[in-house]
Image: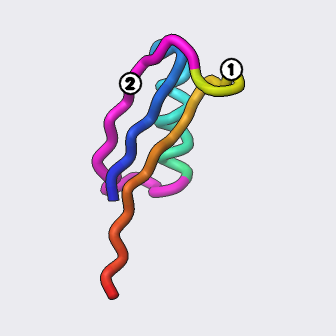
Amino acid sequence: MRLVVYVTDMYRFRPLANKVQKELWGDGPYPPRTIVEVDRLNQDDILEVEGTFYIDE
C-alpha cells in the first residue's frame, strides 16, 4: 500500500491528513505516504487521497 495526499494548503490541511491517518491506522505503522501541496483540486476540494494497494491472491 502507498498513499499520495494532495492538499491546497500544506500548513492548514496536513494536520487534518495526519489526524485521519491516525484514526485509520492507530499509532502505526503507517503506509508510505507522500503529501504534495497543489494550487487547486477538482471542485475546489481541500484534500485528495490517491492510493495504490496490493492484494495477494
At x 33%, y 52%, the residue is: 2
Q: Nearer the viewer, residue 24 or 40?
A: 40
Q: Which-is-in-front pick, marks 1 and 2?
A: 1
Measured from the top left, where is residue 33 in percent x and y? 33, 42
Check whether the beta carbons of the residues at disc 1 and disc 2 lie within 8 A of each other. Answer: no
Tell me if residue 13 comes above or below residue 11 in the rendering.
below
Is 31 rendered above or below residue 19? below
Give the residue type at disc 1.
Answer: Asp
Q: Is residue 39 shown in magenta?
A: yes
Residue at 50% x, 11% y is: 39
Q: Which residues are magenta?
A: 24-40
Please determine whether, in this image, residue 22 is positioned above or below residue 42. below
Any mark on residue 25, and which?
A: none
Mark 1: which secondary structure?
A: helix
Report x, y in % for residue 37: 43, 18
Left or right: 38 in relation to 31? right
Q: Residue furthest right?
A: 43
Specify the quadrant that holds the C terminus: bottom left
Q: Which residue is mark 1?
A: 44
Q: Quadrant of the N terminus?
A: bottom left
Secondary structure beneath dot 2 equals strand
Q: Quadrant of residue 16?
A: top right
What residue did someone put label 2 on? 36
Q: Residue furthest front?
A: 42
The one nearer the camera, 9 or 20, is 9
What's the residue type where badge 2 is placed? Answer: Val
- For disc 2, the neighbor class at 10 Å (few under 14, some 14 to 19, many from 20) is some
